Amino acid sequence: MKNYLRFFFLVITQVFFLQASVAICQEKVLQKTPYIFDTGPISSKQFNNSVILSERDLFNSEKGFGWVIAPLYSFERIQMATTTLRNDLTIDGLTGKAVEFKINIPNGKWWFTFWMETGNDYINSAKLVMNERETPINWFRIKAGEEGEDQQTKLYRVYNSLTVVDKNNFSFNITAGKDSVRLLGFSLVPYEEPNTDLHLRIQKFMLEAGKYKSKISLFDLEKYLFEQSSLNPSDSYITHAYLQTSLFAEADRILQMMGWEWASQLTGLGIFDRLH
């Protein structure tokens, strides 16, 4: 009888571990391709080649991505829709005191970028953890206005970093400090060196556009890269180039608007304000 019970226990144990192994193996690992997540309401207008991500999209092993700690609410900045300050990605987002996202992606180097509203956190007291490692966010301190640092600004900040994935998954956690986390969107793009004629042409344009008094307009280059990324949505080099150029073009727009009264009302920035 004892031998029978011992045999029964061993069989049950082996079945349990077999089922657990199968469950682990069923976690989907996504393809090595660019991923852009446009956070906000389900009904929001979708950013180019992006996936709309609402607060309801919890992590699902079959889907391969989702929230581990979900935001609480979604929001939209409708009043900024007709300005040059926001696009389909940055016009809306999700908010909470903490958010955590996980995605199963192949090992290798990936560009990780996220867009987050400043709110009234002028110094930035939010904390970022990537793959269980706390990572400093060295954002500039924003100059306080007449109402001090309790005023809600209309600015957003961008974090961009090259990270290494080594366990076929990537996760990040942003925990609020002084103010709530207001996440506008984020992207993960595989690192890729230029390896085609089109890549080399784009690299040449970007290097030239970054020079002083360059004849290449950032706005024209952004439009060109938008078209190329639409035609080649799985091309990591083009996607990263487009995202980077769109950031520089947006910063250039804000700099050109400084000093104009109507623009100061939109940005909260005066002619002598500087962003570092």
Image (cartoon, helix red, strand yellow):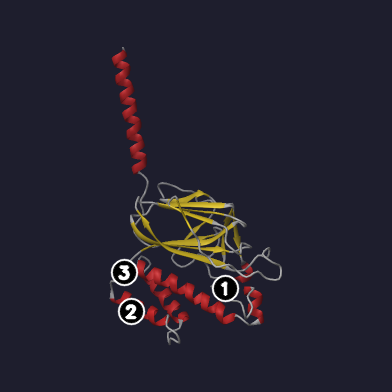
Residue 59 locus on image (x, y percent)? 46, 48
Is label 2 or label 3 in front?
3
Amino acid, disc 3: Glu
Label 1 CA crowd tier, 10 Å (few <14, some 14–19, many 20+): some
Residue 180 locus on image (x, y percent)? 60, 56
Q: Is residue 166 left or right of residue 156?
A: left
Residue 201's disc is: 2
Which comes before the other along the chain, label 1 or label 3? 1
Q: Nearer the viewer, residue 89 or 240?
A: 240
Residue 85's disc is: 1
Classify 11 as above or below 124. Answer: above
Q: Which residue is mark 3?
A: 193
Amino acid, disc 1: Leu
Q: Is residue 96 left or right of residue 22?
A: right
Mark-to-mark CA distance, 2 and 1: 29 Å
Residue 36 visible: no
Q: Residue furthest right?
A: 147
Residue 207 locus on image (x, y percent)? 38, 79
The reply to whether the C-beta atoms of the residues labelled 2 and 3 are less than 8 Å apart is: no
Q: How many marks?
A: 3
Label 2 CA crowd tier, 10 Å (few <14, some 14–19, many 20+): few
Amino acid, disc 2: Arg
Residue at x-position 34% and y-position 33%: 17
Which comes before the other along the chain, label 2 or label 3? 3
Label 3 CA crowd tier, 10 Å (few <14, some 14–19, many 20+): few
Is label 1 or label 3 in front?
3
